[in-house]
Image (cartoon, rainbow, N blue to C red):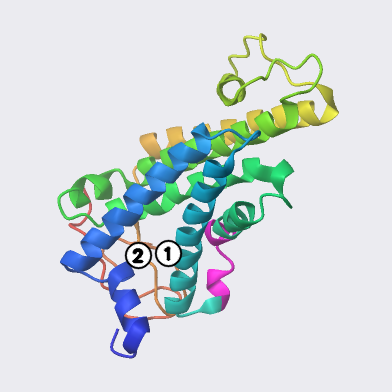
Amino acid sequence: MSDRKGLNRQLFWLYEGHGTAPFVFRWAMLIFDMVTIVYFLWAPFEARGRTHFIVDYMIGGVILLDLLARLYIARHKHLFFMKWINWADMIVVLTMFAPLLVSNFAFLRVLRAVRAVRAFTFVKRVRVLTPFFQRHERIIDKVTNLVVFVFITAALVYALQVGRPNSNVHTYIDALYFTVTSLTTTGYGDVILEGQLGRFVAILVMVLGLSMFLQLLRAIIEPSDKVECECEDCGLLLHDRDAVHCKHCGRVMHIDTRGQV
């Protein structure tokens, strides 16, 4: 952090540093993420009143400031725009500030659920929970990705099927119910998707969802000898637990780990 100065240094300290202020700041952002995820899943997609728009603008403002701050402190700007989580945040900001232009795509606000992935990376840094997360890092990562996939797919099902003639999807819960039963190949048959597009979405849920579920089972069965520690020079994320240098660029790595469990 020695080459950072002024505002860049302060923001980097809050987002990546150690101490009481960064700890409180990141916990506040974590709570904000969880609250907004619940709000996006609960808030109606249609017939929204003035209060909802005010809340949208406030949440959108916080997300935008957070996005700009992370872009400002990013060492490699081009890598920032290559991360799908950041693109999801940009789409959410668009839907929050332009409800009239993208009212038909308001379901995309549920993309905010991908912040659960960032929440996972923060919780790993909590000193009390670090040993537990180091032992089960891959499993929790796969669980998080699966839950995010379910939420986003259910929002897509809801947006495509609600209001259609003969459709059994009337609420977000109906869409979530269909997504889970399809992903687990249970298929009760009481909720089905109408039209060719609906069938395509059902196939997508079964193929992608089942593959992610199998990855979760694989993570549970097969222990990993890798740990996530992003190299500041080349961006390589996975390294051996006892690695001293980055295998890609040779940078000295400082991996906070208690060793192979």
Q: Would residue 17 be seen by someone viewing this image from the given angle? A: yes
Please tell me which residue is depicted at 54% across the width and 61% down the height of the picture.
Answer: 86
Please tell me which residue is depicted at 45% across the width and 50% down the height of the picture.
Answer: 115
Q: Does residue 172 appear to the left or right of 139 in the view shown? A: right
Kind of residue indicated by mark 2: Cys
Q: Nearer the viewer, residue 43 or 203?
A: 43
* Residue 140 sits in quarter: top left
- Looking at the rendering, in which quadrant would you find the N terminus? bottom left
The reply to whether the magenta stretch includes residue 80 is: yes
Q: Does residue 222 appear to the left or right of 104 in the view shown? A: left
For residue 131, above or below residue 150? below
- Where residue 125 appears, x then y in whole percent? 25, 57
Instruction: Please report the bounds of the magenta region as a residue range.
Output: 78-87
- The residue tagged 2 is 229
The reply to whether the magenta stretch includes residue 245 is: no
Decide: marks 2, 1 in contact (CB < 8 A)? yes
Q: Does residue 82 appear to the left or right of 58 in the view shown? A: right
Q: Would residue 253 be seen by someone viewing this image from the given angle? A: no
Q: Earlier in the sequence, mark 2 or mark 1?
A: 2
Q: Does residue 60 appear to the left or right of 233 in the view shown? A: right
Q: Nearer the viewer, residue 146 or 40?
A: 40
Instruction: Give the structural element (helix, strand or loop) at label 2.
Output: loop
Disc 2 residue crowd, few under 14, some 14–19, many 20+, Cα 10 Å? some
* Residue 103 sits in quarter: top right
Kind of residue indicated by mark 1: Leu
Please tell me which residue is depicted at 37% across the width and 35% down the height of the picture.
Answer: 220
- The residue tagged 1 is 237
Q: Nearer the viewer, residue 249 or 12?
A: 12
